[in-house]
Amino acid sequence: MAESIVKVLLTKLTDVGVKEVLQLYSVDEQVETVKRELGRIQVFLKDADKKKITDDKQKHWVKEVRDAGYLIEDVVDTFLSEVPPKPQKSSGMVESMKRKMKITKKLPAVRKLVHEITQIQTRLTEIETSRVRYGINTLGEDSGEIKLPIRPPVLPDIDPNIIGFKEDQNHVVKELLDETIKRRSVISIWRVGGLGKTTLAQKVYNCDYIKTQFELRIWVAISQKFELIDILRKIAAQLNLPINPSQQPKEDVLTKIHESLKSKKYLIILDDVWTDDLWTQIGAAFRDENNGSRVLITTRSFEVAKEADPTCEPYKLGFLTKELSVDLFLKKALPNYNSNESTFDNLSDITSQFVQKCGALPLALVVLGGLLSRKPCNYTAWSKLLQTMSWHTDGKKCSEIIGTSFEDLSLTHKSCFMYFAAFPEDGDIYAKSLLQMWVAEGFIPKEENKILEETAESYLEDLVQRSLIQVKSRSLDGSIERCSIHDLLRDLAIQKAKEDNFFVVYSHPDCDQQILSRARRVAVHHPDCDKLMMSQNLRTLLCFDGKVMPNCSKQKLLKVVSTPFLESIDVGMFEGLTQIRYLDLVGILSDKCIGRDDKYGKRYLEKVIGTMKCIQTLKVNLPTRAQFFNIENFPDCAWNTKTLRHVGTVFCNPELPPSIELSNLQTLEEVTTNESWKIGLPHLPNLRTLCLLHQKSCSWMVVVAFLGTLKNLISLTLSVSGSFSGDIFDMRKFPFYQNLQSLTLWSDNYEETPNEMTTDVLMLPPHLIDLKIRNCHFQQDVMPVLENLHCLKSLGLWGVNKTNRKMRCSAKGFNKLEKLWLYNITMLEDWEIEEGALPILRELIICGCKELCVPQGL
């Protein structure tokens, strides 16, 4: 990861805003010298993250580069936190004098930076000199390739202890023998390393029926760093071709292999393919002869599987069941094990614990079972091993095998994956917050025509496709809502994060304080954390446990702070932390942040939040006492932060000031309409999610005008005090009409005052997938309108149709609806459902519809 650190640092030093500040204080040349030296060092680090470094000299050199990179980042960030940003051009003599005075006041910080940069230059020179002195010219080249799992021989044999795969084998065999497909097709088996892809391929390869259906079968094991010549040599040997690939042009060899295969119905198995360029290079040998030939590949990457043959759906190999996992584990651990006997019942409890640790991964089960096979077969010996075993020591072989998936990741992917080390074991991780953290950390590169969060989401999806991360639930639009990481892979993330000083998990009071004092990111998983001593260079603090948050007032370089489960927080500790980019204070804020009167409380909040000049994501929950003092709004200065991307509040309902421009803002989870918008509407060109509370004091014309400025809105919640304006249901007037996917219309009007709504479905956005309507008392049945929203997946109706006793869903209506909620439709008596309506409905909630009988046709 040393190259990753250097890459991030070089990106930061290239940032236009950073360069402007450095130029302003005339220190840009010194920093540029350091940047050039880092660029030279980066050349020699290029292979560091791809090769397993075993030489102590190389390890020490990489550590020195990493530490130097961290030091430069600390020095530059400290300087940027102490000096003001580039001031606006002076328009007069007084302003010019003030500007010069500000620069003069910061001269000590400038001198300090120059001094530290000079020391760093000396250190980098020494590091470069040591590289040459000790012959570290081709980093990692002499240490060999990453150790991969032992591959089967050319003609693989089946392990007699193989468990499961019967259904998987039947599925793959059926795909291979599909007579409706005459062309040469590619079938792919994909999933994380260690799950049994090779084993399944072996079972298919040795299946008696497969042997009778294919005239020729060839097995080729592919390494992560393959050479096409070696692969061609293996194929030629099995075809008995008298060629020497190393002495003949590759094109000639590919042609001869093709000539040898074209008259035969063959099955080629390419085991453990890592990159899609393999198929690009070797595909010419397996051209289509329209005779039912097949190629079967196994891979850890969904993209590789899909690229091999886009017309064939890759087969996703599942995890073993608990019962099969226990069987496999015990067969390896106990040579005389028989599942039909009860001899080993006394080990069932501890066996379950070992199996859980292995996470249904066959490879992990086999390795750990092999380890236990050399131990005494009794509960005491097994229990002792369970208590003392370090999964990365005793289980090192398994960790290395599974770890090859990690080594295959890009630098950005590695940073994103290691971030999962911070989260509690077996806990759900909310993807939206995770992506916002990645952006705040600076991991995500800018891609053309995509916002950073979209790019971050693609990285998360890639980790899922590589089976490193598991999806727990998806939103209606298909994006990941909640995810998790398997225990074994979380252990790997923790190990890698610890090696690179990337993240430290504080889970026990006896945690090494020396390590904590150097940590750049800390995740707290223990309640006794209020006296935790942390590094002044700390960048990230995530608290998942504890009643009181550790005091971080001295950590001036903090970027990410999250406290999702704390009982109280003193917001005052964040005063002066100007570098914070992500702040999640959803715990109950301490009453210390609230004064004796409304004015003092607002001034206090303004003093704290107003100093956060780089804030991107701000989530705040004000306590009951704050409401008592009528503290309902953010300080106005908070809205002046141009970097804001996401604002989430609870019990706040802040007002946006008029004419404010926030070009980066994407999320406003709660905001109140403001009559002062008549002066000038807020300019939020990239807003995507909006929860808007309309006050009676603000006219509907202002609301309509504001919504008319939002072109990129995807989700809108419109909550009103009273009744909706009659024309608000016609969304065609708004520029987000074609983009809106989620719409919630919420009214606190409980009277029987009906709203006007035509039956024209074109009034509602055509691509809605989620619609909720509350207390909109329509005189007519709304179902004929809503059932024609052909993208609709979820519909919730609260208190509608109070004067209408009948509701009807016609045939083929709601053809994509999965969820339907009906609440407090008190007058509804008859619900007619024609045959063919609601064809894929899977969730129905009916509550408070007292007159409604069970509908016919459901």
Image (cartoon, rainbow, N blue to C red):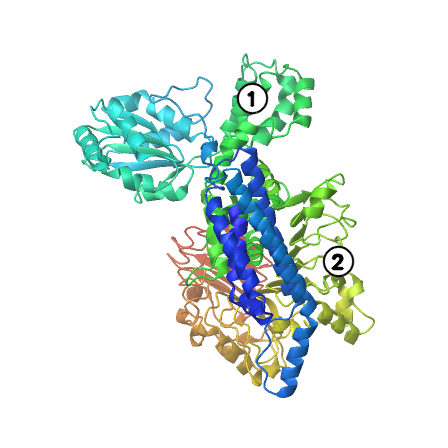
Specify the amino acid type for callout 1: Gly
Residue at far right of view? 596
Tag of residue 16:
none
Q: Where does the image place residue 308, in percent across and percent down from the top left?
A: 32, 41
Q: Which residue is mark 1?
A: 369
Residue 298 higher or lower than 11, as above or below: above
Horizontally, is 458 left or right of 175 in the view?
A: right
Sequence-wise, the earlier of marks 1 and 2 is: 1
Q: Residue at x 58, y 21 (%)?
A: 371
Q: Residue at x 31, y 31 (%)?
A: 231
Determine which residue is flagged by label 2: 569
Pointer 2 local density, CA inside 10 Å: few below 14, some 14–19, many at least 20: many
Answer with the quarter of the image where residue 339 lies. top right
**720 or 51: nearer the eye?**
51
Q: How many numbered dots are placed on residues in this image?
A: 2
In the displayed structure image, the side of residue 410 where residue 631 appears, left or right: right
Q: Secondary structure at mark 2?
A: loop
Amino acid type for the residue under numbered disc 2: Ile
